[in-house]
Image (tube, grey):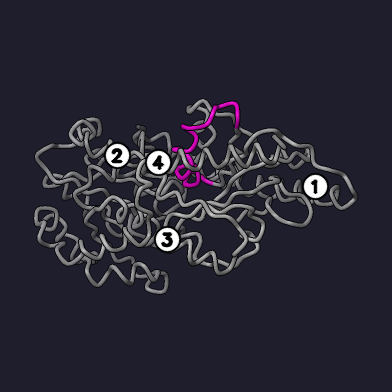
Amino acid sequence: MREADLSLFTEETLTQGWNRARIYEQQMRLAVARADERVAQGEKPQPIAKIGFLVHRRTCAMHFMTTWQHLPKDSFDIVLFDDGYEPDLFEFIAELGLSVAFCEDLANGLFQYVSGISHRDLPVCKRQGYSMVGDLTRLLSYGFSKSRACPFNDTAAQFIVQGDEQVAQYRGDYPDTPQLVAGYARLDGLAACQADKEAIKAKYRLDPAKPVVVWMPTHSGPLTGAITLYSRALMAMTPHINILLKPHPESFHEPPDCHYLRALVEDGNLRVIRDPDDEAEIFAIADIVLTDLGGTLFGAIYAGNDVVVTDVGRPDEISALEREIWPHTPILTPDTIGELVRLASDPGAFAAQRPVMDSLRQRLFAAGTEGQGGRLIAEMLQRRFAAAMGR
């Protein structure tokens, strides 16, 4: 587990990191364009006999970590696209002892992984021209799979879905693409963490006598988001409740969020977490998950957490799923955020929400896959790799 510290908020990470991101993206796109030309002229990509995990951001890595645990380390590479927004992303992967490759280097060398996996729409996976992966698997995580028929999905030879709802959705648009139902692999460790709550709370230095609010605000970019609107008020609540803040990774490096995060880290009363040892830990110890827009809601549904929403004033970004839950959910504003202390000590406040969340869990995530998703994905990737290699 890594807590945030002031080294994340240096001039290099906040300003030079952005410049590196822009430069690297330009270089990457140029390299891919040159590779397209070489393929058009008849040159064949050189195969890499490994599985390539295309990791666009740290959030992508979170989806794959439980799968990496079930694969031999020499059987796959982590393909990084840039380190501008998250300057320590390379170090994060390297600390896991995993092999890293960079998109620009691969395109310049006209290399192609025999098989690979991604969960985002990326410019290096396509049918025409140069593609960095031959046999591509697409992880269809909720939140980034709302538009089912899209060019990136067209390139996939295999889908990974989380439950019956996604099976039905994608079967209509892609009847010939096989699907692996793997549940929510990202939180495979949930049951073990729930059984070890007190030890996890001690590791995070939380007061065992106070309720635990896990605050997971989404990335707001240059817009005014939850960190800007609510951090000062929440900091004042720490005498009454434990608050564990797990920001979106990009919030550490982009204003205005980064400036407020620096103030929270300097204050020290509100725990700011950069990387948990296992994401399942923070859902397991949460009495309340505090969130706004974005993918945190899926983890809370899966883990059975009570949810409180902070209003960030962007109604046009509310998803269909959020509209389904919010009528049964406490929604706090900057004027009413003080209610959080009372809610954290009042289990009855969530009586209307819990049956809705239970129903959604059954609908969204396949039963019988709990704790098995990473293994199921790893075994499928190994089978596809062997088939692509003609074994």
Q: Amino acid at mark 4?
A: Gln
| Residue that mark 3 sits on | 164
Question: From the viewer's perspective, is 9 left or right of 282?
Answer: right
| Residue that mark 4 sits on | 372
Image quadrant assignment for residue 356: bottom left
Q: Position of residue 90 (x, y in %)?
A: 54, 34
Residue 281 numbered tag: 2
| Residue that mark 1 sits on | 35
| Residue positioned 55% across, 42% down in the render | 380
Q: Quadrant of the N terminus?
A: top left
- Looking at the image, tell me whether mark 2 or mark 1 is earlier in sequence order: 1
Q: Amino acid at mark 1?
A: Ala
Q: Is label 4 in a helix, a strand or a loop?
A: loop
Q: Which residues are magenta?
A: 57-75
Circle 3 crowding by C-alpha within 10 Å: few under 14, some 14–19, many from 20: some
Q: Is label 2 in a helix, a strand or a loop?
A: helix
C-alpha separation, residue under disc 3 versus residue under disc 2: 26 Å
- Is the residue 287 above or below the residue 97 in the image? below
C-alpha separation, residue under disc 1 versus residue under disc 4: 38 Å
Q: Amino acid at mark 3?
A: Asp
Image quadrant assignment for residue 373: top left
